[in-house]
Amino acid sequence: MRVAYLTNYYPKISHTFIRREILALEGQGVEVMRFSLRGWDAELVDPIDQSELEKTQYTLKDGVAPLLLNMLRCMVKRPGPFWKAVKTALAMSRNGVRPWPYHLIYVGHACRICRWMEGKGVTHLHAHFGTNPAEIALLIHILGGPKYSFTIHGMDEADNGGRLAFDRKVGGAAFVATISSYTRSQLMRHVPPDVWPRLKVIRCGLPAGAFEEATTEPSKSPVFLCIARLSAEKGHMLLLESFADVLKNNPDAKLVFAGDGDLRPLIEARIEALGIAHAVRITGWISSDQVRAEIQGSHVLVQPSFIEGLPVVMMEAMAQERAVISTYVAGIPELVQPGKTGWLVPAGDSDELANAMEASITTPHATLIKMGRAGRKLAQERHNIETEVARLSTNFAETC
């Protein structure tokens, strides 16, 4: 079986879950071609990501001109499918997130990828995210390409669900992977019940080795770790307010932000304004090994997200036997169980977040260890990449 993967940006530091999925598929004997719109100039810190870059073909790497040339070529060779694709793209632009010229460009991406796949024996196309990659996958299918599927993750799809033409995208798909039951339920709001059976819960996962590695005990001093892109929806600014309160009674507490992003200047300014620079560290983008080291140096993971799908970093922390503090958002309660594997608080409530952080400090060390072990067991049961990819591969094979 040979499948093609389509993403908007690949490889990407915050999208290691896509890379793991592709490599796990290849480990199970599936050949995978990689297509992406962007990502050839990404600053990468992980050697595996750098290797993936060399395996990926980019539709925009040499500008828009090749897209236009491929559109002309397709219009001449396949006029019927071409004009059907154009009509479909324009229909999806109505009330869309982006205006109609973008959707015509998506036709260009589809035409170019179709040409790349000619004669390659691709049996299935899978896209990640229900935004423009899913639209391009649909257009490729209309142009004569293989059957397709796509994975939705939650944030962009939830923000813009009514403007992403899910009725067309799901209606044309062989199946749709959703990363949690909650995510599946949100997609069910936007598509008719007769296509609900196509919506499959196929979770993101970690390789078996992640659960077999030796773990360390939680730090006996309070070290809160937050692993996320520095962006508004991740709740970093709220976390700073809560941590400043916690610090008043726990002067030895530390907070680590592992990641980088557009919000960094604002976060740094707020750290200075709160007078907590001595207790807060921002790592910037770091490799997978460095992430693991930060987890091992922490006593809990804290992810105060406002909107999410289901953060893979929670699985990574649980694999290292760390309890998690997070919010009652999306698929998070499917993994973080209050009193068993961590703490959950209402999103946006700095007082409740501070209370949970205080509770993690006063919880006996032996109890933190017990919670960490329970989290590892749950994550291993639900988020083993080999199991989840086998489900994905089975669905691929059933469409061939």
Image (cartoon, grey):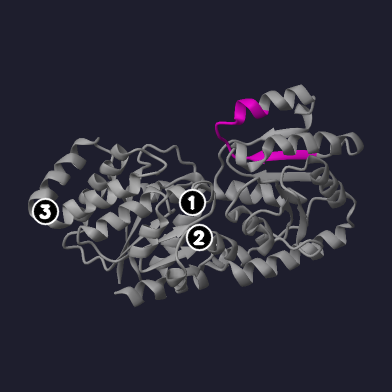
Between residue 343 and residue 19, name the one nearer to us: 343
Q: Position of residue 219 (x, y in %)?
A: 79, 50
Who's the residue at 83% across and 41% down the image? 351
Between residue 190 and residue 135, name the one nearer to us: 190
Query: What is the magenta range?
Result: 254-267
In terms of image quadrants, where is residue 225? Answer: top right
Find disc 3 in the rendering and name its residue.
Answer: 79
The quarter of the rendered structure image containing the N terminus is bottom left
Q: Is residue 165 above or below residue 240?
A: below
Name the kind of residue labelled 3 in the image: Pro
Who's the residue at 55% across and 34% down the image? 261
Q: Position of residue 72 (x, y in %)?
A: 12, 44
- Residue 161 badge: 1
- Element at badge 1? helix
Find disc 2 in the rendering and name its residue.
Answer: 187
Do labels 1 and 2 touch, CB within 8 Å? yes
